[in-house]
Amino acid sequence: MGTPDIDLTASELKAIEIHKYYLSEKEGREVSLEEATADFLIYYEDEFLLNKQRDDIQQQHQEIEKYKWIKSEKEGRDIGEERAAEEWVERYGSLWRTERESLERNGFIEIHTQVRKKEGIHINMVELADIARRNNADLYLHKDHMKHYNFILFGKKAYLDVKSILCPKLLDAVHGEHIEFIATGEGAHAALEVAEALIEKTNSY
């Protein structure tokens, strides 16, 4: 069973990956996502959230100042800080937060595919783990019905690290199921290409 209490944003997942890298360097081995997540949530999450809140406030203030200047120029008068803040939050606040927490903004790339084979497919998780390691990438899988997973992203989708000890050797996916991969790291693009090719190959038999 997964861990539904670990509900992350893209920026938190990125911070955990960075933490995982430094822990691995310190210990001279590849620290697992489970270890890095537990250590981060216990010892570093509060500091991370505080720093992120400060940074978000600063960035929002800069965006509001730009909006105030543009709007004031357009109207030929100073619209004031309060009005600028209210209008910016109402018009752009939600979009700004969504973009700031997007996978792309936080260094992740993603691909989507679907199981076309009528009898379903068996995804070789051992091979996916090897793909991630060979390409020096972190690779996560989501499908419609996840029995095993490491975390939930944005309170919606469950993801499994293909290198996780939670991975079965083969992961079943039925006809019509959607499969999504997200990846990060210097070999993320290459890892996604090979992972997608593996799914397509399995789909074709």
Image: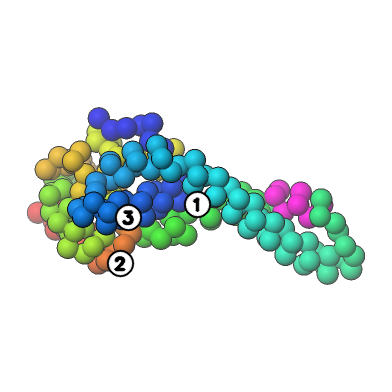
Q: Which residue is mark 1?
A: 101
Q: What residue range appears in magenta? A: 83-90
Between the residue at mark 2 and the residue at mark 1, the CA separation in whole angstroms equals 21 Å
Q: Residue 95, can we see it? A: no
Residue 187: quarter of image = bottom left
Query: Residue drawn at (19%, 59%), measured in percent from left and top?
Result: 133
* Residue matched to label 2: 186
Q: For mark 3, does the 10 Å Cα neighbourhood hold few (<14), some (14 to 19), or many (20 or more) residues?
A: some
> Residue pushed farthest right?
77
Residue 5, position as x, y percentages in the image: 38, 31
Whether 70 is drawn above or below 8: the answer is: below
Q: In the rendered structure, does residue 84 fall within the stretch colored magenta?
A: yes
Q: Main secondary structure of the magenta part?
A: helix
Q: Gap between marks 1 and 3, in whole Å?
A: 23 Å
User: Which quarter of the rendered picture does the C terminus lie within?
Assistant: bottom left
Instruction: Give the residue type that dot 3 points to.
Output: Tyr
Q: Are marks 3 and 2 in contact (CB under 8 Å)?
A: no
**Residue located 83% across and 69% down the image:** 73
Quadrant for residue 77, please give it: bottom right
Which residue corresponds to mark 3? 22
Q: Secondary structure at mark 2?
A: loop
Q: Is residue 55 left or right of residue 157?
A: right
